[in-house]
Amino acid sequence: MKRDELVRWIDSFLDIDGIDDVSLNGLQVEGRPEVTKVGAAVDASLKTFEDAVAQGVDFLIVHHGLFWGKPEPVVGPLRRRLETLFSRAVNLYAAHLPLDVHPEVGNNAVLARALGLTDLSPFGEVGLKGRFSPAQRLHDLADRMGQLTGMQALVHQGGSDLIQRAAVVTGSGSSLIAQAAREGLDLLITGEPKHAAFHEPFEWGINVLYAGHYDTEVFGVKALAEKIAAEFGLPWVFLDHPTGL
């Protein structure tokens, strides 16, 4: 299909222009005008781009793109990344916050549904909160996260082992521990732990599951690629380059 048609559809579907973000969301690098294969990845890294080229991807969707609110000199790693895209005319499309908050294919929505959270409502700027019915045991939820991501979650148990109300903030959400406690939640599920927040779960009396920044943000790009495949019949592939963080 035509690249520009696909870009317009994604822009509208994710409301790219309606969400403020430090990321330059949308088409970041223009490649060939015809799209035959979509790639989905978390990070715009050189390895990801080389993998895309090797697998014949001509439209690559990433959560963490190349450009973040200020001009960057095209030298060193950035130059090599761009050269790799240009060498095979690969289109690069980035969706950061729009892919976090989307109610259907967003990272938080997909993960919350996979965990069985119901009665979902917004939490913080991008997250969701909801309820487990029946209530779940904390370490059963940690095991479930491990099944979903392939990595064992880090458990900071500051509260009860029985979880009824929980919030999901994929990526980096440790700054919301206090808010989660004030709202009476039993659990915050997020990505990467921060040293500055280590003591907060125990002092606020709330549980936190840290399941990895990368590992909690694979869900959105996969769901978006699946949506595109369903809408337009384009084949797609997930390019997995985990960071362990």
Image: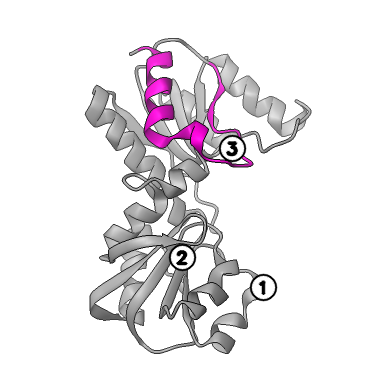
State the image quarter where residue 70 is shown.
Answer: top right
Amino acid type shown at disc 2: Ala
Residue lying at 36% horizontally and 88% vertically, measured from the top left: 161
Crowding near the residue tagged with mark 1, few <14, some 14–19, many ≥20 C-alpha atoms within 10 Å? few
Callout 1: helix, strand or loop? helix
Amino acid type, residue under disc 1 in the picture: His
* Residue at horizontal 44 percent and vertical 23 percent from the top: 59
- Report the residue marked by disc 2: 211
> Residue 108 placed where, x, y %?
40, 55
Magenta region: which residues? 2-30
Q: Mark 3 points at which residue?
A: 45
Image quarter (top left, top right, bottom left or bottom right) of the C terminus? bottom right
Q: Residue 195 carries which label?
A: 1
Q: Distance between the residues labelled 3 and 2?
A: 21 Å
- Distance, label 1 to label 2, CA atoms, is 15 Å
Left of 67 or right of it: where is 57? Answer: left
